[in-house]
Image: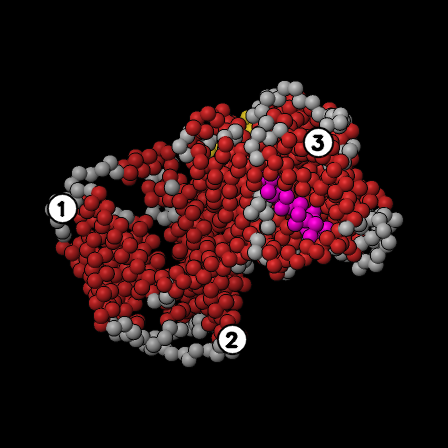
Amino acid sequence: MAKSGTLILNAAARLLLPLQLLFSLFLLLRGHDEPGGGFIAGLVAAAAFALYLFAFGRRPLSRMLAVSPRDLVAMGLLLGVGSTLPAWWVGEPFFTAQWWTIPIIDFKASTVLIFDVGVYLVVVGSVLTAITALVKTDQHEDER
Amino acid sequence: MQLAVLGGFAMASLAPLLHQWFGAQTPRVMALLPAAIAAWLLGQWPVIAAGEVLLLEWAWVPGLDITLTFLIDGLSWLFALLITVIGALVLVYSGEYLHGHRDLPRFLVVITAFMMSMLGLVLADNLVTLFVFWELTSITSYLLIGFNHTDPAARKAALQGLFVTVGGGLALLAGFVMLAVAGDSWSLAELVQRGETLRDHALYTPLLLCVLIGAFTKSAQFPFHFWLPNAMAAPTPVSAYLHSATMVKAGIYLLARLHPALGGTELWVTTLSLVGALTMATGAFLAIRHTNIKTLLAYSTVMALGTLTMLLGLGTPQALTAFVVFLLAHSLYKGALFMVAGILDHETGTKDVTAMGGLRRAMPRTAAVAGAAALSLAGLPPLLGFVGKEAMLASVLAAEAWRPLILLLAFTAAFLTLAVAAIVALRPFFGAPRETPTSPHEAPSAMLAGPALLAALSLVFGLAPGLLDPLVAATLAGIGAPASGVHLALWHGLNLPLALSLLSLALGLLTYRYWDRLRARLACLAPLMARGPEAGYEALMAGMVAFAGWQTRLLQNGHIRNYLAMTLLVLVGLVGHALFFRHTFTLDVDLDVYLHEAVVAGLMVAGAVAACVMRSRLAAVAALGTMGFSIALTFVLFSAPDLAITQLLVETLTVILLVLVLFRLPRFATLSTPLERLRDLAVAALTGGLITLLMLSVLSGERLPRISDYMVANSQPLGHGHNIVNVILVDFRALDTLGEMFVLALAATGVYAMLRFHARDHATARPAPPRESDDG
């Protein structure tokens, strides 16, 4: 199942995917002040990829992703742990948030944002790991 | 210094990359770091020699009193120097030993990480930090013992070492907590000042026993000694480094460090000196039963570790001086001998000493190094080992309690060790040449440099032990002994220790002479050996597996309703108890419900009821979905947009997952009896009722100050964010979130592994189950 969808589904998935990803990035970046954040944005992105998976199957999805979802999880964890270190470096207690303002675009960069990106990647990676694993076993059985 | 250690961990993770750049030279490049740290330590020598204590402070989690402060005094300086110098030598050596090995980068990653953990362990001032490094050494040791992971014996030995040391680590953690409570500090520098208070504290006995279990397991004391010889499954550089020079001395280091805080009581003296003496004799006796050169050396390490423990137990200034000298001597000669053993293995292709002979012609330089190191092991002049052994025997002769027993055990150990030294140094190199699997030739100088340097140091310090006086004095200050008037000498005149040495020399040589015959005789002890502590370990492991199986079958029998019932009943019990007995339960709510709220609540109830009574799976799922979306609606009504979005997305993804699994599920059927369903209904009603009461009780009566007020007030000033939920998640409670991230990652790994193995099992073992789809 889920190898290839109908024409409408395929076209919709192709069109919706970039929009959904853009929306998830939007949610991720505005999360600190408005409803959103890494967890929600991660779920949106995962749903977007899931739609693509339903439309085109597992192989096209992994071709598009280029990295395994499990590596996304690992990267997310690394970012999460890594975001704790700058505070340590400047001699503040472990995990104290650090803020920098990037001057020209007036963007608030922070370890908090790095951490949130870590959450985002872990959520996307975990959900996709589970879903692709389920599809994989399906296809495995189909092949026999 | 902290940066050097942390940088070391970073370098460890970069080892594969370095290997791409430097190829076979990588180990030498990486050896520069420990060499640099050693140079830095040597630069601090004037300060240390003056008796000062360096405290390099660095906060970590000040709220929990956890610091990354390093404490450098004579004791930690000596250990750190041994770790870095031998570490650098071992890295260079392993570059040759594992030359061209496919997994060299992996080896470098783990051994460098181990090196840094060990360095952190001996330098840490904080008990928590020390414990973290302690466990890191156990884990890296596990990975190194199991380096040849295709060999089941290596895997088993690795697991055994891990279980024993980590089991002891648990006891150690408990001991540390009690220590911190009793001494009212987590800092070692402060704790060692509070010996009086600690020794009189009610917790003294339990905390000492816990700490001792931790130290004894790590340092392979009887009856935990069995893991160390098995750990010889590791590559030889690992044996030389972890299992003789450094890691197994972690327990010894801890005991020495805590000596001023906990030592000197009757319990301390009796336990340490008896366990130590027993370990000495056991190690030496078990050694001569073996012909594998690494096993021989491993048991003699057990013997040496026992000696160190015993000397710490005796605790007299004389014994502590002997402790320091013996510690240094052992690190030097044992490191050298293990590396020689690796050379022999590398050149001849066998580890069995009885299979080697006459190698001195093919490898004269190796023979010389082995001879010098073995003389030190044997405790013969003019090597440092002799100074150590004389001091040891002298302090045993001065022991106050249990003198005859300890003396007997120590003397037995001494002459058997001499026999071991003779076996290791004479057997392979003298006698008639023998055919070995590969034809031997002299070892490359990179392999020989390390052991040669260590053996040379043994010789220099043996000829002029006076050179060590300031070092011994500084170390003694760290152990809490009077440091004045230390004077080491090779020649003490004709005295009782010397006489004992001569006697042990004679007995040792006799043992060597008749070793082959003796070994045959000792073979009849095999059935007895099979009942040793290792059998206890095996029984414990089997028992644990059986217990785990029993309780899994009892609690996790595959019926999800049982899991749920169990979880919910425990919840009801705990929450109910707290609600009704710990607090005064009041109900005082004026329910003021709007129509639209009632509608949403009604939808939820309808969804729940429908999900229970539906006869089709898809309908039940749809009913559950109704409930989920109603909950999301509730979040919207009570202005929690983040929760609402999350709930909606989770519902959506649930649908996706269901689509994927729905057609694989068996036919929708009622499997439970009416009675069981009645029981489930009761559990559900109980849980629901209790949670409702809890909510109502929270809303009524007097309100405690709410944590959310703090969050609301500080979200913008401290967290720079208006979205309180997100600020809590990524800033105020970020540590919790980090934990959740790991949980999520573990869950994903679990799902992946389960589905993959499931699929593989299906593909290989069983025919595919008949595919049924009900209404999907």
Most foreground residue, B172 or B745: B172
- Name the chain letter of the residue that bears numbered label 3: B
The residue sitting at 70% across, 56% down in the picture is B521
The kind of residue tagged 2 is: Ala
Secondary structure of the residue carrying numbered label 3: helix
Residue B503 located within the stretch drawn in magenta: no
Residue mark closest to the camera, 3 vs 2: 3
Answer with the quarter of the image where residue B216 lies: top right
Asked if marks 3 and 1 fall on the same chain, the answer is yes
Most foreground residue, B776 or B539: B539
Q: Position of residue B111 (x, y in %)?
A: 64, 45
Asked if marks 1 and 2 fall on the same chain, the answer is yes
Q: Position of residue B98 (x, y in %)?
A: 72, 51
Q: Position of residue A78 (x, y in %)?
A: 51, 47
The mark nearer the N terminus, 1 or 2, is 1
Disc marking residue B587: 1
Badge 1: few (under 14), some or many (20 or more) residues near its Cα, within 10 Å?
some
Residue at numbered disc 3: B497
Secondary structure of the residue carrying numbered label 1: loop
Q: Mark 3 and mark 2: span between their CA atoms?
A: 69 Å
Identify the magenta region.
B276-298
The mark nearer the N terminus, 3 or 1, is 3
The kind of residue tagged 1 is: Leu
Answer with the quarter of the image where residue B112 lies: top right
The mark nearer the N terminus, 3 or 2, is 3
Residue at numbered disc 2: B765
Q: In this rendering, is residue B138 above or below B713?
A: below
Q: Tell me if residue B197 can be seen.
A: yes
